[in-house]
Amino acid sequence: MSSTAIPRAANVKLVLASQSPARLALLRNAGFAPEAIVSGVDEDAVDAQSPAMLALMLAQAKARTVARRVEPGALVVGCDSVLDLDGEPYGKPSDAQDAIGRWKAMRGREGILVTGHCLIDTRSGRGDDASAKDSDWREVTRAAATLVRFAHISDAEIDAYVATGEPLHVAGAFTLDGYGASFVESIGGDPSNVIGLSLPLLRVMLGELGIAVADLWKTHPKG
């Protein structure tokens, strides 16, 4: 057994392997103080047999890429969201026309927003030992799915929404924390998952690594 103790979770840095301002805001509002590092993973280069598998593979690729860059001892969480519509995966639209086409296909229907999560504990049981390798990491990978019911919106509403630029930067060409919320009639499941990171699932994943979610709180959630 190693004589070097694993650092207390309260003293461990949480790193978000994402450029998503929505995910960063979600974690901050929930009491965390993460550092955000963009992975640079080429999402178009990853292929999978299902939307859920694609989300998981991308989340894992992002988390592992960033985990290799951070100082030993950090917790790294990577996420990727995909809209499953009739079994087809929809990430970010390629351009405005793509976003318009998607919304015309989505309106009045239901889709499943799948978010893959990968949590890596780089502490590896050896404290700040800089010699720790990838194989020493502890890693948990899970996916969360939320049913989304889209309103039957008009062509004019679709054009106005796409003109805001918001749908070009989010999976499925919509989000719950911006203009797109007006066009989502209801959801079945965790709303934070639709925003890009399931907070209840993150708590469970932390627990699997022996970490209490409250130990990572740096700020008090807004009341």
Image: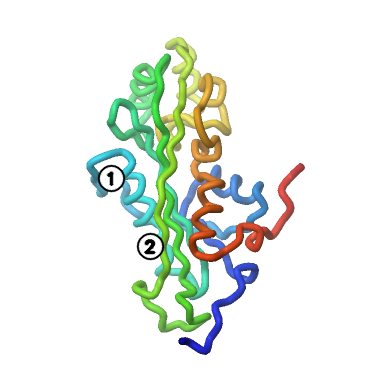
Q: CA distance from mark 2 to mark 1?
A: 17 Å
**Residue 91 rendering spot, x and y as whole percentages:** 36, 37
Q: Quadrant of residue 131?
A: bottom left
**According to the image, label 1 marks what residue?**
44
Residue type pointed to by label 2: Arg
Q: Are marks 2 and 1 in contact (CB under 8 Å)?
A: no
N-terminal label among 2 and 1:
1
- Point out the residue furthest to the bottom here: 3
Where disc 2 sits, the SS reads helix
- Image quadrant holding the C terminus, namely top right
Residue type pointed to by label 1: Asp
**According to the image, label 2 marks what residue?**
64
Identify the residue at horizontal 48%, vertical 16% (top origin). 151
Identify the residue at horizontal 49%, vertical 22% (top origin). 161
**Residue 52 rendering spot, x and y as whole percentages:** 33, 41
Using the image as rendered, state which of residue 146 and residue 75 is in the foreground. Answer: 146
Answer above or below: position of 135 versus 147: below
Q: Quadrant of residue 7?
A: bottom right
Identify the residue at horizontal 31%, vertical 38% (top origin). 51
Q: Residues within 10 Å of mark 1 (few under 14, many from 20)?
A: few
**Render colour scheme:** rainbow
Identify the residue at horizontal 41%, vertical 79% (top origin). 132
